[in-house]
Image (tube, helix red, strand yellow):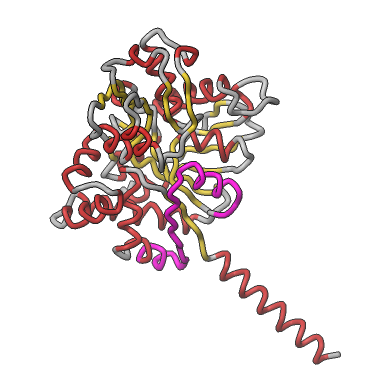
Amino acid sequence: MKQSTRILTLIAALCWGITAQAADSFRVAWSHYTGWEPWGYADSAGILKKWADKYGIQIELTLVNDYIESINLYTAGKFDACAMTNMDALTIPAVGGVDSTAVIVGDYSNGNDGIVMKNGTQVTDLKGRTVNLVELSVSHYLLARALDQNGMSERDLKLVNTSDADIAALFTSDPNGAAVTWNPPLMQARNAKGASLVFDSSKIPGEILDLMVVKTSAPDSLKKALTGAWFETLAVMTGKNADAALEFMAKASGATLAEFKAQLRTTAMYYQPKEGADFAASPQVRETMEQVRKFSFDKGLFGNAASSPDLVGIEFDDGSLLGDKGNVKLRFTAKYMAAAAGL
């Protein structure tokens, strides 16, 4: 009996050890986008491991080539954190019941998302055209804002849901192409013969936010490690060895160094943690999310059962809320960026 008890105790201890080890290992997803390429460099250069080691955890960074699929996998529980935009954080994991926190506001798109077309030079030329985009993503939001500013609606054109991995090639091969996408495929499309950029995110500054979203239940060790690694990487990008880091990112994204630097110019990066913290704590985040949640509700992204944009609660850095306070599933915080800034 004592031997049996001893064996059971040993098994329990081993199982506890395995569970504890698993709990200290975390999976993070990202996909190609100018503002997220630093994650690939942080992993390759050992910066991510350095910060994971500092907090006694393991971080496995995985590149998922299909952006929306990366968020779906996060929502399904395959990842503990994922790079995504503010709108997608609301309409996929939050609506799906996953409580998430935006621990890093890395940048806002300031021209990195755009509408490009052939045989046309302005938004009104899209009338009657077929437009490729990742439907119900930030590209869809950008298109809706562009149409609204030009007195048009989606009824004036035909939308075709297209993977971001395929958009540039489809646009280039179509003599009458029209697409909405983000960099790097946006730059590839813009370089196609006869292409014109007719609208971009610089017309709606601060509305398309690029985030690192982490499960709210994840420990501070993961949130702090990711934030520390991120801002160390951004420091490299602006330091004396910047070109080597930028060359790595450019190659990984399929761009030349010159092209990648051009993409960075249309990305309002928060290179200093205080800049990111200040923005995350600003009233503009709430104002933006008010617009985003209304658009998302109007497009049916909250599901057929939703009777108003209040279905999902959104919490901001000052503790204020939009939506259902009993169903808060998306949170914005300046806490970790402020800590990285020594504030």
Residue 21 in percent (x, y) is at: 56, 70
Magenta stretch in the rendered image? 50-78
Residue at point 61%, 31% (across, down)? 312
Front residue of 176/69: it is 176
Is residue 81 inside the magenta stretch? no
Side of 94 where 116 appears, left or right = left
Side of 84 where 178 appears, left or right = left
Residue 252 in percent (x, y) is at: 30, 53
Front residue of 66/42: it is 66
Residue 49 lies, with reference to residue 254, above or below; the image says below
Residue at point 20%, 42% (across, down)? 259
Front residue of 84/250: it is 250
Residue 210 in percent (x, y) is at: 39, 39
Residue 121 lies, with reference to residue 267, above or below; the image says above
Residue 336 lies, with reference to residue 285, above or below; the image says below
Residue 308 in percent (x, y) is at: 63, 20
